[in-house]
Amino acid sequence: MAKVADRAAGKGLVSSLALAAYSAAALAPVAAILILSPDSSGTGMAGMIEALSQPRSLRAIGFTLAQAAMSALAALAIGLPGAALVARYRFPGRRALKALSVLPFSIPSVLIVLAFVLFYGRSGYLNRALMWAFGLSEPPLGFLYSFWGIVLVHGFYEFPVVLQTVGEVWERLPKDRAESARLLGAGRLRAFVAGTLPSLAPAIAQAAALCFLLCFFSFAVVMIFGGLAGSTLEVEVYRRARLEADASGAAALALAETAIAMAVVALVALCERGSSRGSAAARSAGGSPELEAPRKAALAALVAYALFLGVFFCGPMVSLAVQAFSTRGGPLGKATLGLGNFARLFAPGSPFAKALAGTAVTAIPAALIATVLGCAGAFALRRRGAPSKAAASLPLAVSGIVSALGWSLLFPRGGLALIPLVQALACMPYTLKSVSAALAALEAAPTEAARTLGAGRARAAAGIELGAVMPSVLAAFAFAFAASAGDVNVPLVLGQGGFETLPVYLFRLSSAYRFPEACAAGVILALISSLVFACKERGGRDA
Amino acid sequence: MLERGEGPRAGEMLRLERLAKAWPDFRIEVELGMSRGEIAAVLGPSGCGKSTMLRLVAGLERPDSGRIVVGGRDVTALPPERRGIGMVFQDLALFPHMSVGANIAYGPRMRGDSRSARSLAVRSLAESLEIGELLNRRPNSLSGGERQRVALARSLAARPDLILLDEPLSSLDASLRRRLRSEIADRLRSVGMTAILVTHDPEEAFAMADRIFIMRDGGIEASGLPEALYESPPTAWSAAFLGRGPVLEILGLEGPASRPIAKTAIGDFACRPRGGAIPYAGESSLFFLASAPKLSTGSGESSQNRLRGIVVSSYFAGYCRRVSIACSSAACAPVALELELPAEQRPRTGETLCLEIDPGSCDILPGLSK
Amino acid sequence: MLFSHRGRAVGRSLSLLAALLFLASARIFAEDKALVVYTYDSFVSEWGAGPKIAPLFEQATGIKLKFVSKGDGGQLLSALMLEKDRSEADVVLGLDNFLAPKALGTGLFRPYKPAGYEAIPESLKLDPSARLVPYDYGDFAIVWDSAKLADPPMSLEDLTKPAYAKKLILLDPRTSTPGLGFLAWTKAVYGPAWRDYWKRLKPSVLTLAPSWDQGYGLFTSGEAPLVLSYAADGAYHLEYEKTERYKALAFTDGFVKQIETAGILAKAKHPGNAEKFMDFLVSAACQRELPLTQWMYPALGGLALPDSYRAAVKAVRELRVDPSGLTDEALEAVDILASKP
């Protein structure tokens, strides 16, 4: 027995060391900014405190928090009805709706901004339609360039995260509690509050926290739509580091930003504990309830939601696709529809093929590494407490700007081999979470059955547990691939201009007046990501 | 130095020697032996530790002390995969992501059997269990009975020395349960498999097992052949658990050992003599089969071996009529007895019945019913 | 045996990828002898000048060029300040007149007057000792979408008119160089009264885009008919889209120039080759390539411009501005726009 205990302790030590190394890697960019950045003012600590106590910094912190909080609420408002529908009803497009959650991660923000502008903008389709319908001479909707514009864009950009996270838990929730509440005389709403909401609350909180975090770090969206409304921490860090060489200021704000984000990450981890308890409740009730075909009120709600999303969410995306298919020409610069942009992308000698290959050689290994390490981490952390799980989410607390700055400080010469590693690190919290959740929902009996059939511990884990969670592993891979394929920061920073991926290419297209071609490249990027997701769905069914 | 328990006894397949494991509020300690080819049932109420005992045997839990010997081999320290013990789980634990064929082939694959040997074994087992058509299906798409057969086939395919069945029929409906019960037992016997069945259902245990162990609070309360246990349960608790008839606390014993008289709250009863020493008032109980009392024909005055009570309820139960009567006791509240009368007798509720019991039907059993 | 066939396939592809990555990095390290030029990202992009001039230079001199992009111009400077003398760069290309004072202040550059230096107009030369040598220039201008707005403004003051409410896309002076250039422009025209001007300008500004590409993207999507950009933009649209819909406006105030420069680092590992590169950079062979890649005017005078440049607007007046203190004023400018009226 003593030997067994020793071995367990040894294993604990190894996984603790691995966790420590992982946390160090996750926080390396912040540490680099703190330690390595050149301090032209030489003020150090005092400079940091001074930078933080400036009214400008405090205003930025306040504004960042406010817009992130409101945006998260908006995402909840848009996503929760969808989660309810996805959890209970069977309808065409259900899977696609759930798969939308990859969107905020896979499409570069330049294009997202453009999409929303094309639809909601002053001469966007929505305003044009309203002007035509009511015979107006000026666009009636001007709120896009305001605080509420940020909230709207973030809400529509991130609601799929809510829909997926909450829907996942909701659909596994047994209906009996809400049903028994109804039999005891509670109305539909009260039955929901008494029977369903308590089990759902952790997942809702978790989704809200994740959206909050994504909006908290949002850069382009906040600047373009809220440029006149206020400054954010991301902008302040970027500005100080880029032009001012104000190391202590940048470090202070980066530190404040990361600290706030870490608090949110800790909250997410805490919620996760609650929601895994919720899914345990779902499990004990014996599997997930069957999906129903929607009828009457549900059908009406479904159609209304589909219309709502079709107009307000798909509208911008379709506008982007239209842009991809239109070319400007002629003396008046009129746009005409056609395949010209795609033809130019695929023309011989175009660097598109190189960019595609660049995406493949970074995103595939990044996704593989993130998935393999995510699985290993999920198995290793299975029996660990909330602090370890919070540590696993640490990369979530490092913003895009901080990460780009930090890694460029750490590797001033760049390094291609580092690109997939850094991208994998950023995806790890998501892959780990995906596999962990599936493992937590797994019953012990099949693994024990495998043991009694002659499989050793490792073989049972690899063959039975890994096999049973394979759909989640594939989902994790697809997610990591899409997120890495859509990332522009890391290849720009570590590739130093000598390396092209699709998003880098897209970024360069838009820096060279070629927006329709950029949209075309974006459409292709989105197609590749959806292709990977489609493969995952098929693989998940076969596995 | 040949100690007790060393070396295989002839034909013995499993021996548990003082196998023990303790928790803060519960303790298991089991000692039992089984011969090769035997089907044993471990019968007990829920929470008695029978499933945990099975998990100890399978190696899924570690004992604090004691030994597990399978076919003369001490497997106590071995991991589950090297014990040669198969198990059919309560919820069957089929691998949801594998086809039925892959589920059955899993054990042979782990043994390193060749692909052809595997498919041959899977096919022949599936044929004999009538699931040959299902090999390419997923477990989720099967009916309860089909899943049951797949689970059994999967365990058998691994060619274990011993199979453990943990409430394997509990999730099935009554008629299917009755049918599968004999089918599984026949199947196990036909291949000469040694098996332990854990169940809380006496009927299932009697139907399937060659030998029955009754488990109570982590220990073996009684064991024996099904027929013997059925006719005369060896302890008061097991008699009560099996539900074969009333178990009454004995307040005092009189008379010679050849014709002991037990004093209970509802009267005195002359009993069958017991072989060996007589057990002892306050620590023993009076037991008779529910069908033993007969309607009294003699005069009403109550003396030995007579019961007098008011009918509380009475209903027709097929081969008999179940009657619940309340007997007024000397001391306190009336004592309720559940009896079986011939089906043609129809006592009305509220009627007072007089019954008598042959002393040859009254047994003195050690222990109390609770 | 631990993993199934799926695992083995994963393993195979992993090792294949590792080999690929190794080869890729090996190729990069093999370029050790190449002349290293630090620059900004759009210079090395497919449509930038980099890919055009590198083979020309290599043909002419036999020297390999390696461009290293450090992001945009601002990031280029901060990378340089971080690396100091440890930089692997021989030449730094792409520091403009707004960044030049800070760049020269680092003391990292050494003077070199390339062949043909005299042919560069004096007005472009930022550093008398020629540590930074101008290679192209352009004017900041407001670009007009003639399909969306009938009556364009003709001066900075015009921009403040109510007719242009929410019709102007500016770039954020905190994060973008043209954004800073616009601030310099208003400073050159209004002097210390630029703050008042920005207050008056506020109603006309639709938004502050963080970078040129995002701002111009909004503009070409039809979001606003006026955007801050460059005076040569019309040439691009004429050359590639055959349209004169988008025109830079020749404001009566005159224009502020952006002058791009390059310089040799004092600690350059290949000083001789670096000098050859500087000679090449201001030579006609190289300068000819700039108008259609950089959309800037070549620094070398007397070169014939492409026909499309007839759509580029010339300054009615050259404005000069001292870039010192601009970055602090950028914060002020943004505060003015963000303040509640």
Image: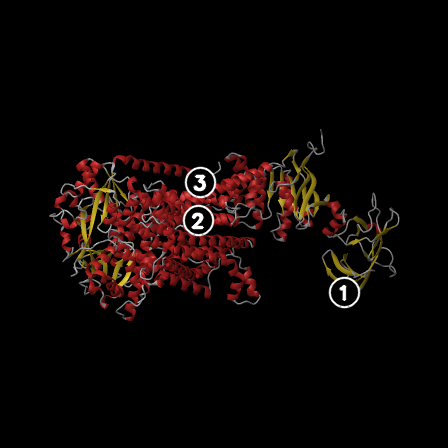
In the displayed structure image, the side of residue C64 where residue A405 appears, left or right: right
Residue C6: which disc? 3
User: Which x, y percent locates residue A240?
Assistant: 32, 52
Q: Is residue C47 visible?
A: no
Mark 1 secondary-structure assignment: loop
Looking at the image, what colour scheme do you see?
A: secondary structure
Q: Nearer the viewer, residue B329 or C163?
A: C163
Residue C213 located left or right of residue A475: left
**Helix or strand or loop: what does disc 2 sit on?**
helix
Q: Position of residue C134 (x, y in %)?
A: 18, 47
Residue at 61% in and 53% down: B173
Q: Position of residue A301 (x, y in %)?
A: 43, 64
Give the residue at mark 1: B349
Secondary structure of the residue carrying numbered label 3: helix
Amino acid at the residue labelled 1: Thr
Kindly identify which numbered label has been placed on residue A394.
2
